[in-house]
Amino acid sequence: MSGGIDSSIAAALLKEEGHDLVGVTMSLLPRADGKNGNGRAGKSRVQEAVTKAKEVAVKLGIPHHVIDFRDIFQEKVIADFCREYSLGRTPNPCVRCNRYVKFAALLEEASKLGADFIATGHYTRVQRDDATGRYLLKKGIDTVKDQSYFLCQLTQEQLGQAIFPVGGLTKEKVRQIAEDLDLPVVDRPESQEICFIPDDDYSGFLKRQTPNAFRPGPIIDEDGNTIGEHRGIPAYTVGQRRGLGIAAAEPLYVTAIYPERNAVAVGPKDKTYRRELMANNLNWIASPPEQSVRVKAKVRYRHPEAEATVTPVDDDTIHVLFQEPQMAITPGQTVVFYDGDTVIGGGTINT
């Protein structure tokens, strides 16, 4: 229970169905002593989430616990986030959090409370395929709110112990239920940012965490000519347009990052488009392909799905060829594959 509307309604729906519930709020954000991040801002947000979650739990008549996961969150999510940016890559911390914290560490702790399943407010669904015995991850009914992308790294064991009560509802319906039940979360704004960067200042956060990674270096054009100076490669991502500090006849975009040279390459928008990528760190939810297969693929959460062919290279590497060039294919980001509304699997873009 995050203190938000979606997890609150998930709890309310399960309570209405007669399930025996225990509300759990994970303490994830940096310590107030500043040992793993932003300190006071993190403490304030945690307190607000815990307060709202407790209010909902009281309203529903269920017990509520707060579990301290700050250390594992720091290790598995924040540290990885900083390390990847220092290497010129752009990670998706929500994907890692779901795999290693929400559906791994939390499952372990939940079992100690006597729980058999974890229910969250994600807009997605799980179905068991009777033919194969595998659990399938499906898109949420609300296509705008669908969050299956963020869960592409969940294992079969994790999916088998997951329940997503709002996956079959629209956001409008969820809000209506909250109003009907008079839950104290109806008016809470939705978070659109990464939870441990509340001000959405990625560069500032990374500079505080990894100051040595912020070494000025050359900004180069398509021909390798130096046309400016960057302030440190963690401050840039492929496809970025703003903040380059270069006057040019046409808008320039980051087309590549070369950490070994401490260089950032820029060019016109058309140079940010590519037709292919390599990915590893694969997780197959449906049966893994043994040969080339046609899919719909997303290279970022807000990126539209696109027709592509996935070809296995080895046990943990695939080649993805898109039918049409895609903008800002970015190393470190998550690529997810779909067959209709079913998630086939996903991996990490390598090149």
Image (spheres, rainbow, N blue to C red):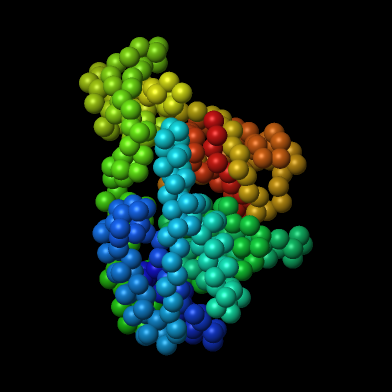
Query: Compared to 307, does 103 lie above or below?
Result: below
The answer to which of 270 and 154 lies nearer the viewer is 154
Side of 274 relative to 135 (left or right): left
The answer to which of 31 and 199 lies nearer the viewer is 31
Instruction: Say whether residue 116 is visible.
Output: yes
- Please give the count of numbered marks on the rendered protein: 0
Q: Quadrant of the C terminus?
A: top right
Residue 59 lies in what quarter of the image? bottom left
The answer to which of 220 and 107 lies nearer the viewer is 107
Residue positioned 65% across, 37% down in the render: 317
Side of 28 relative to 116 (left or right): left
Query: Compared to 2, does 231 lie above or below?
Result: above
Residue positioned 55% across, 56% down in the render: 99
Residue 231 lies in what quarter of the image? top left
Instruction: Say whether residue 148 is visible.
Output: no
Q: Position of residue 73 (x, y in %)?
A: 45, 56
Query: Compared to 106, does 200 lie above or below?
Result: above
Residue positioned 33% across, 37% down in the render: 211
Q: Position of residue 345 (x, y in %)?
A: 62, 49
Residue 318 lies in what quarter of the image? top right
Q: Position of residue 277 (x, y in %)?
A: 56, 32
Residue positioned 61% across, 63% down in the render: 158
Q: Position of residue 27 (x, y in %)?
A: 40, 65
